[in-house]
Image (spheres, rainbow, N blue to C red):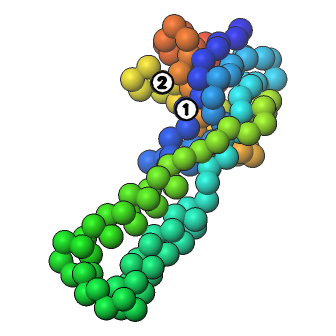
Amino acid sequence: MEFRGVFTPPAMGSRHRPIRLGGDGRIVLKDEGLEVHARKAEKYRSHIAVIFAVAVLAVAAIADTKLNLNVLDGEMLGIVFCVALFGSLAFMSRSKLGSEQVVLFPWASVKQVDVVEGELTILIKRNDPKGTLHFKPVGGADDAATAVRSRI
């Protein structure tokens, strides 16, 4: 049995780490396990965000002292801080899709299946990778959830 849809890994998980597979793909229910066809979602590293924020604040402070502007007080400091904060968040939330991956998760590692707002969330444990798969099947998640639950 096969279900097509879109893998939508969140930026971060609440209880379990999301498995970094994204974009258009499909899940195939086989006798051996759950076979997932998707693209690897390669998240930009969060250290780039921290470097960006520190660089923005450092450039603003150096420019203020070297040029004797004395503008980094009150509202201006708040504006510089907001630019650093929102710029770093933009770096953290972007992800790009890499090469296509085919991953087979044995049924013994599929532990839980939930449907939240039309998205199928599958918890994978004792496997590499482990975490949660986030998948929005075409036509709704209920049929896919029922089919996966019948195998675990």
Q: Who comes first in sequence, dot 1 or dot 2?
A: 1
Q: Is residue 102 above or below residue 55?
A: above
Task: Please give left or right for residue 42 compared with residue 84 in the image.
Answer: right
Which marked residue is nearer to the observer: mark 1 or mark 2?
1
Q: What residue do we see at 63% from left, 29% from top? A: 23
Say which amino acid is labelled 1. Answer: Thr
Q: Is residue 64 above or below residue 23?
A: below
Task: Please name the residue that numbered disc 1 is placed on.
Answer: 8
Task: Please give left or right for residue 4 compared with residue 61 in the image.
Answer: right
Q: For the residues labelled 1 and 2, say whether their Cβ atoms are less than 8 Å apart.
A: yes
Q: Quadrant of the N terminus?
A: top right
Task: Please name the residue that numbered disc 2 is placed on.
Answer: 119
Instruction: Name the spot of residue 33 as percent of width and height, x first.
Output: 76, 25
Instruction: Name the spot of residue 52 as percent of width and height, x first.
Output: 51, 68
Q: Is residue 86 above or below residue 33?
A: below
Say which amino acid is labelled 2. Answer: Glu
Badge 1 crowding class, 10 Å Cα cut-off, few under 14, some 14 to 19, many 20 or more, is many
Instruction: Name the spot of residue 135 as percent of width and height, x first.
Output: 56, 26
Circle 2 SS class = strand
Residue 123 occupies which quadrant of the picture? top right
Q: Is residue 92 above or below residue 100?
A: below
Q: What residue do we see at 24% from left, 73% from top? A: 76
